[in-house]
């Protein structure tokens, strides 16, 4: 087991505990809504985003405690984005993490509203928690994450993805870069930057965290695209080969699998270089994380 | 023209200007998404919520300037809630403010994502603006509004509304009160409380603002329910008589129109009394507002 895999395993209970504390129980009204939010939130997600926040915090000298609620908030926001992406009007997916998607298990109205609730709760938690972090920093956290996931960020990437699916644009390579930068990269980069805000980093370090996060995101997304081509639905816990059927604009679709793998390694090396600049030559736990996310065994 | 109608008319340009400044232009990528957000945001809404914030601020001695971005944020959140409510999986409405609903004019994916974007932007604006208001207060604004519109607030009310539609509950009167309290009341009360936060009111005054806001919300919702029975689609700019067809749990549906009108007057009188307690005997502009919202001529 790699160093990062051990880190992830070690912190998983605390991350899940934070989520469990922050999300209303399924016994509280409206019961079905809270049950639906929890169905998607506790579906066996790897908690990569909270782990990235904790790991970055560790490298920057911030304790785990104050980072857990922020990391949990990002996981809520990530889960909302998956729930809405899976809807019939968007990607129309029946399977997610090996189980029926939320709108298949409940219904579409519930999936829309559970997603809305998780988005709302995520941003609210960033404002309200943790009380020991100064108001100024929590405010910056809401603003930074809010911008990263809005129409100029994650949602913009989702729209570009849907539009490219209808018709591949002439400048497909540039559009693909934009899609991945926003759809995956912006929230992943937020996971790093959030720890930076709590740590009180300088603007220069924030830019470095942002760049590192985006390279990790790019690498992660290329690996995901390749998995969709090479994996089976059983491996993936979601329908394999769907990208090609939907004519999604992806790295393997545009460049082929071999070239995609070469680009993945490029992004990985850039990420390793940036991690070195952030933490000193060793890169701390980042190299292990980067290798973990660039392979299929995640 | 009543005093409040004049107040509304006077402030409308500044409210619309704030919205126009805060929402990305339709010429900026992703263009169709920004166009969709603006389609619903600039559809001739009355701007009741921002006006409530401005009016409350006026009574509490806060200038308009700092209230405009907060009021605009609430209007974005209100608009998101309408866009998602209108979706086929929820109320399935074709008409809103006399024009095709967003998912009819664009498509469902765009309506889901434009709603998500407006919700995200609304909460982000509450964090980022206005710079002259202390971080502590802006943080409280995000937290207060976030809780008001989440699963325990507005979305919870929407869920209760949908569930009651499927089958009227045994305790219909209690459920109806819960639906209106959360679906309409929580965001309306936030409009008042937001001005209170900027004004630095005490906890007791905040409770009073909350109660006043909820009585205004109740009155507003009963008037709306009655309009759906008595109005025509032309009057309403949306499909009339839809509540009865959908077997919605409403005041006229449960108590009949006459009893509903009596309850509207009760709520109005309670609101007038609360306004008097807040601002002194005259109630300032509140009585005019309350009369405005309790009649159909709005």
Image (cartoon, coloured by chain):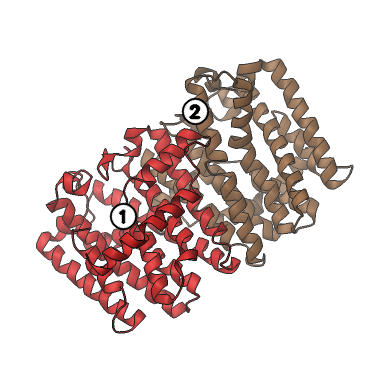
Chain colours: A red, B brown
Q: Secondary structure at mark 2?
A: helix
Q: Quadrant of the N terminus of chain B?
A: top right
Picture coordinates of residue A140, whole percent (x, y): 53, 66
The subunit letter for the residue under badge 1 reads: A
Above or below for B93 versus B202: above
Residue tagged by mark 2?
Answer: B162
Residue at the right extreme, as displayed = B281
CA neighbours of label 1 inside 10 A, class few (<14), some (14 to 19), many (20+): few
**Quadrant in which the C terminus of chain B appears:** top right
State the residue position of label 1: A46
Subunit under mark 2 = B
- Between A49 and A219, the one nearer to me in the picture: A49
Q: Position of residue B173 (x, y in %)?
A: 63, 22
Which residue does the image show at 81% across and 41% down from the upper left? B275
Q: Is residue A276 left or right of residue A254?
A: right
Q: Residue drawn at (44%, 76%), measured in percent from left and top?
A: A61
The secondary structure type at the circle numbered 1 is loop
Crowding at dot 2, Cα within 10 Å, few <14 / some 14-19 / many 20+, comes out as some
Residue positioned 38% across, 47% down in the render: A41
Q: Quadrant of residue A93?
A: top left
> Does residue B197 appear anywhere in the picture?
yes
- Looking at the image, how many numbered discs can be counted on the residues? 2
Residue at the spot 45% in from the left edge and 47% down from the top edge: A118
Q: Which mark is residue B230?
A: none
- Mark 2 vs mark 1: tell me if same chain: no
């Amino acid at each position: 087991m790699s160093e990062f895999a051990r880190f992830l395993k070690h912190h998983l209970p605390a991350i899940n505990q934070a989520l469990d504390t922050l999300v209303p129980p399924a016994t509280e009204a409206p019961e079905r809504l809270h049950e639906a939010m929890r169905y998607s939130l506790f579906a066996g997600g790897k908690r990569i985003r909270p782990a990235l926040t904790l790991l970055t915090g560790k490298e920057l000298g911030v304790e785990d405690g104050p980072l857990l609620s922020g990391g949990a908030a990002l996981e809520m926001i990530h889960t909302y984005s998956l729930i809405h992406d899976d809807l019939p009007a968007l990607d129309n997916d029946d399977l997610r993490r090996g189980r029926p998607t939320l709108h298949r298990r409940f219904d579409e109205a519930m999936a829309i509203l559970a997603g809305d609730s998780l988005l709302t709760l995520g941003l609210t938690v960033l404002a309200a928690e943790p009380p020991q972090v100064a108001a100024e920093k929590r405010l910056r956290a809401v603003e930074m994450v809010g911008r990263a996931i809005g129409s100029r960020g994650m949602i913009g990437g989702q729209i570009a993805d849907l539009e490219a699916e209808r018709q591949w644009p002439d400048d497909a390579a540039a559009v693909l870069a934009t899609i991945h930068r926003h759809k995956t990269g912006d929230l992943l980069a937020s996971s790093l930057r959030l720890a930076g805000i709590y740590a009180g980093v300088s603007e220069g370090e924030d830019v470095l965290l942002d760049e590192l996060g985006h390279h990790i995101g790019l690498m992660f997304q290329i690996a995901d695209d390749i998995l969709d081509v090479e994996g089976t639905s059983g491996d993936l816990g979601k329908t394999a080969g769907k990208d090609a059927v939907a004519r999604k604009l992806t790295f393997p679709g545009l460049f082929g699998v071999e070239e995609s793998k070469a680009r993945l390694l490029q992004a990985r090396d850039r990420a390793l270089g940036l991690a070195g600049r952030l933490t000193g030559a060793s890169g701390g736990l980042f190299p292990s994380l980067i290798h973990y996310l660039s392979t299929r065994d995640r």
